Amino acid sequence: VWKNLLPSSSLSSSSNTSIIPFEESEESPNSQAALWDYSNDDQDKIEDIFQRLSTPLYPEIPSYSSMNMTYRKQLEKDTLAKNGKIYNDFMSTPIIEPKVDYLIRPDDELAGSANATILSLVTNNDLKELLPSIQQLEEKFNKKFGYPYVFLNDGEFSEEFKDTIINMLPNGRVVKFGQIEKEDWDMPDTIDRERYKIECEKMDKLKVSYVKKESYHNMCRFYSRKFYHHPLLQEYKYTWRLEPGTSLYCDVDYDVFKFMEMENKVYGYVLNLYDGANSIPTLWETTMEFVKKNPNYLNPNGAFDWLKENAQKPENFETAKGYSTCHFWTNFEITNLDFLRSEAYEKYMDHLENSNGFYYERWGDAPVRSIALALFLDKSRIHWFRDIAYNHNPYTNCPKCPEGSMRCDGRCKPGLFTMWKDLNIENCQATWIDKIMSDEEKNLY
Ligand code: GDP
Ligand code: MN
């Protein structure tokens, strides 16, 4: 019954329209068709999806507020033991790289040929923290493939910033510096400043991080819904997002962008966590409003179980009103921008924008992006780059290497998610491994 719609290779960056279909059916290659077209016969399927989206993954677990303290403690202990074991067992397998038919090596003719760029949103003040991140990305990956860089800023980049970056990169590396339009960055006029202030004070008392920084709200909104329309990114299909202060610990000896392209992946991540639920109290219900109006965007093979997990942080599930808060940590993300430029994603963003949660709450780009990916995409098109050893404090993805391998530089400890033991509960990866990954994916490395 389900037509497996092929991704369109014709959706090139030369397209001038801002909203383009992400996937098209073979029958009507040029239609603005939704990802999945439900005929009336498929009503059951839709109802089945809504059933899953309204039911906790573990329905036997009571709501957080109705649990007594003993139950809470026991549940936490049991869940951490179970999920910790899933994660540790998985991470204890030595891996090198994905075992696919074809990886593009540095000496391959196709090396560096993907339509891709490294992207970094920063200010002049980030230079010192940014340089080592660029240096490591070059050393471990990009000196072999030569992908360009795009730096974006809401303000103006100083000559010092630009010169320093250009001078540290090899000759000939394409580097572009761009400024963001005020209307794509600033708080829109539709936001009532008085109410914004009151809501932020309330969230601040609930310890929502960065909630009193207006620029952080702007950043989250920009990275959710505007960055992929920036003129400097128009020509690109893939981005690798790079943040200051991040580290890479292992060599990547194949072209990851070509991997994305050849394996038909839409999104690559390395870390997957719970969010601060008080930053998104109405994001889930706002999302459900949207999909009820637009059920045809839902993908029957979405990563629903991951969105509905309610055992490890039942307090989050309750505060977020039915959403686990599991999300891909977007400070590292490799993205096929065609997905973000698709009708489903764009309309979803308009809906979120109109509900004002980027300001009256502090919706992060990470939960926003993750929910869209988990609802609209076949889960097999989301790839965990287990082989990319990455740190953004306080979390690390550190693979175990085979005996004698020189791929990793020894600066991370295999399988160690965080140095702070009490933060292990923030790791959502076990649910991804257990409930989302197919056997084929588990054996890909
Ligand atoms: P965290 O990772 O959630 O702690 O947030 P960061 O402070 O690292 O911000 C996320 C990304 O947005 C980083 O790449 C920052 O450099 C960038 N960023 C955050 N705020 C601003 C801002 O006001 N202006 C610009 N140009 N970039 C920002
Ligand atoms: Mn950061």
Image (cartoon, grey):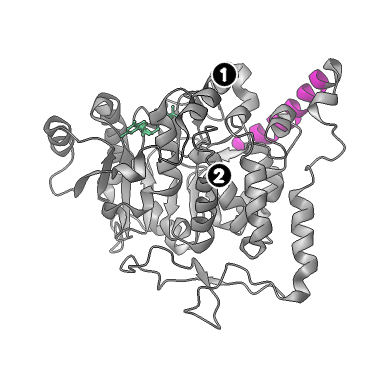
Residue 217 relative to residue 435: left or right:
left
Who's the residue at 67% across and 62% down the image? 295
Numbered disc 1: secondary structure: loop
Residue at label 1? 207
x then y, percent, for residue 158: 15, 32
Quadrant of image for the N terminus: bottom right
Magenta segment main secondary structure: helix
Numbered disc 2: secondary structure: loop
90 in magenta: yes
In the foreground, 188 or 340: 188
Q: Quadrant of ligand 1?
A: top left
In the foreground, 283 or 3: 283
Splitting the image into 4 quarters, where does residue 60 fall?
Answer: top right
- From this view, report whether residue 203 is shown above or below residue 53: above
Q: Nearer the viewer, mark 1 or mark 2?
A: 2
Magenta-drawn segment: 72-92
Who's the residue at 48% across and 58% down the image? 339
Picture mark count: 2
Residue at label 2? 355
Amino acid found under the numbered disc labelled 1: Lys
Sort mark 1 into few (<14), some (14-19) or many (20+) by Cα contacts within 10 Å: few
- From this view, report whether residue 240 is shown above or below residue 19: above
Splitting the image into 4 quarters, where does residue 37 fall?
Answer: bottom right
Amino acid found under the numbered disc labelled 2: Ser
Who's the residue at 73% across and 50% down the image? 53
x then y, percent, for residue 4: 61, 72
- Residue at the farthest bottom position: 27
Res 444 seen here? no
21 in magenta: no
Sort mark 2 into few (<14), some (14-19) or many (20+) by Cα contacts within 10 Å: some
